[in-house]
Image (cartoon, rainbow, N blue to C red):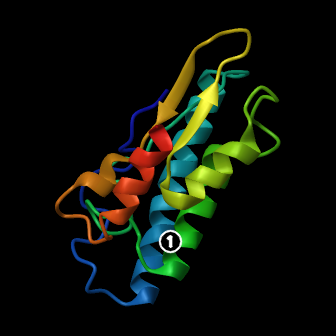
Amino acid sequence: MINGDFVKHGVALPSSNMTKDQKIETWQTLKGVISYDMTQVRQKFPNTLILPTIGNNDVIVHDSVPCSPGVHQMYFSELFDVWFPADLVPTSFNREAAFRTFMQGGYYRHDFEDSTTSLLALNTMFFMKENECEFDKADEQLEWLE
C-alpha cells in the first residue's frame, strides 16, 4: 500500500476559482507525475499488487476533491487507469468492483486471496474542512464501510 501524496506541494491549484481549462491543465501535470511515480514503483517491485490512496497533493485543487461532474469523472477515471491499468494488475485484484466505488469518490476495497484480510483504501479528503464538495460524499463513504 502506498499512502497518498505522489506529487510535491505547490503543484495543485491553490483555489477552485480557476477556469476549467486551468484545472484540466493542472490535472495533466499531476497525472504525469503520478504516472511516473507508479512506473518507478512497478519497476522496483515487479509482480506486486500496488494499492495506492489519494493524498491532499494528488488532487487538482489542493486539499479538495474534484466536485464538478465533468472534472470529477475525468479525475477519478483517469487516476484509476494510472493506478490500476488492466494489463498490469494481477487477476486477484477485482478491478471492476474497485472501479465502481472509486468512481464514487476515490475509495475501494481489496480482498486478499486465501485470506480473511481486506484492505480498505479510503479517501479522507472528503472529511477536510477545506474540501469544497458537499459532505454527502463523506457520508456515502462511511455508509459504504458499514
Report the residue that reaches farthest toward the left.
129
Residue 72 visible, this angle = yes
* Residue at the (44%, 80%) spot, across then down: 68
Q: Position of residue 125 (x, y in %)?
A: 31, 53
Assess disc 1: are there few (<14), some (14-19) or many (≥20) residues with their C-alpha within 10 Å of its C-alpha: some
Horizontally, residue 106 falls left or right of residue 3, namely right
* Residue at the (22%, 76%) spot, across then down: 15
Q: How many marks?
A: 1
* Residue at the (74%, 34%) spot, across then down: 89
Q: Position of residue 104 (x, y in %)?
A: 54, 60
* Residue at the (78%, 28%) spot, across then down: 90
Q: Position of residue 25 (x, y in %)?
A: 47, 77
Foreground pick, 66 / 9: 66
Horizontally, residue 113 falls left or right of residue 14, namely right
Name which residue type carries label 1: His
What secondary structure is found at the residue carrying circle 1?
Answer: helix
Q: Position of residue 11 (x, y in %)?
A: 31, 62
| Above-or-below relation of 87 to 136 | above
Residue 56 visible, this angle = no
Foreground pick, 29 / 83: 83
Q: Which residue is mark 1?
A: 72
Q: Which corner quadrant of the image does residue 57 belong to?
A: bottom left
